[in-house]
């Protein structure tokens, strides 16, 4: 059976020794390691872009000011994104909700991405908790304080 490109990206992230270390540090100390975060965003940039695209698609964020790749939130490398891809991305996000929200905050704080993307990330963080899709997944998701 052929594996989806998005599933392959997710599996590569989960197998990455830097990601494993990043997650261990977060789980133990509840901090986001800046060096590892930068390294992970760079090495798993396609997965990061798909995460943004899925949020743009689901929550209807304005794409006028984004780069051409992010404006086309229905495709990844010329191929249509599928509902399964949406499931892969949001399961990963909600399973690690607190860690990813803290990571997004650090991306914004350190201005690790262009301002246009930072605006989308701010909208993701400012989204009312009750609008999150977490009810569709079996993970217990709690709002960060």
Image (cartoon, grey):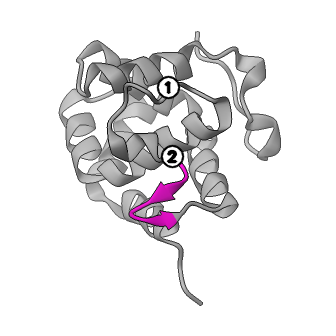
Which residue is at the far bottom? 1
50 or 17: nearer the viewer: 50
Instruction: Tell me where residue 11 sits by quadrant.
Output: bottom left
Q: SS class of the residue under badge 1?
A: helix
Q: CA distance from mark 1 to mark 2?
A: 21 Å
Instruction: Tell me where residue 31 sits by quadrant.
Output: top left
Circles 1 and 2: CB atoms closer than 8 Å: no
Q: Position of residue 14 (x, y in %)?
A: 42, 58
129 or 55: nearer the viewer: 55
Q: Position of residue 119 (x, y in %)?
A: 41, 17
Which residue is at the far top? 145
Location of mark 2 (residue):
73
What is the quadrant of the C terminus in the image?
top right
Instruction: Tell me where residue 118 sits by quadrant.
Output: top left
37 vs 90: above or below = above
Residue at 57% over, 50% down: 89
84 vs 63: above or below = below
Q: Is residue 83 magenta?
A: no
User: Taking the image as drawn, is residue 103 in sight?
Assistant: yes
Neighbor class of circle 2 (other Cα within 10 Å; few <14, some 14-19, many 20+) is many
User: Taking the image as drawn, is residue 30 in sight?
Assistant: no
Q: SS class of the residue under badge 2?
A: loop
Residue at 48% over, 31% down: 99
Q: Is residue 78 magenta?
A: yes
106 vs 83: above or below = above
Position of 135 compared to 26: left or right? right
Neighbor class of circle 1 (other Cα within 10 Å; few <14, some 14-19, many 20+) is some
Position of 67 compared to 64: left or right? left
Residue at 53% over, 73% down: 4
The part of the chain drawn in magenta is: 73-79
Location of mark 1 (residue):
101
Tell me how many marks there are.
Answer: 2
């Amino acid at each position: 059976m052929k594996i989806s490109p998005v599933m392959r990206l997710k599996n590569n992230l989960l197998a990455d020794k830097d990601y494993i270390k990043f997650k261990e540090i977060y789980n133990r100390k509840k901090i986001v390691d800046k060096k590892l975060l930068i390294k992970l965003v760079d090495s798993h940039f396609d997965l990061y872009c798909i995460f943004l695209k899925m949020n743009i698609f689901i929550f209807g964020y304005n794409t006028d000011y984004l780069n051409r790749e992010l404006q086309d939130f229905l495709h990844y490398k010329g191929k249509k994104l599928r509902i399964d891809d949406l499931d892969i991305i949001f399961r990963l996000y909600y399973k690690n909700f607190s860690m990813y929200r803290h990571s997004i905050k650090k991306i914004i704080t350190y201005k690790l991405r262009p301002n246009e993307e930072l605006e989308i990330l701010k909208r993701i963080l400012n989204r009312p908790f009750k609008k999150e899709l977490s009810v569709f997944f079996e993970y217990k998701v709690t709002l960060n304080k």
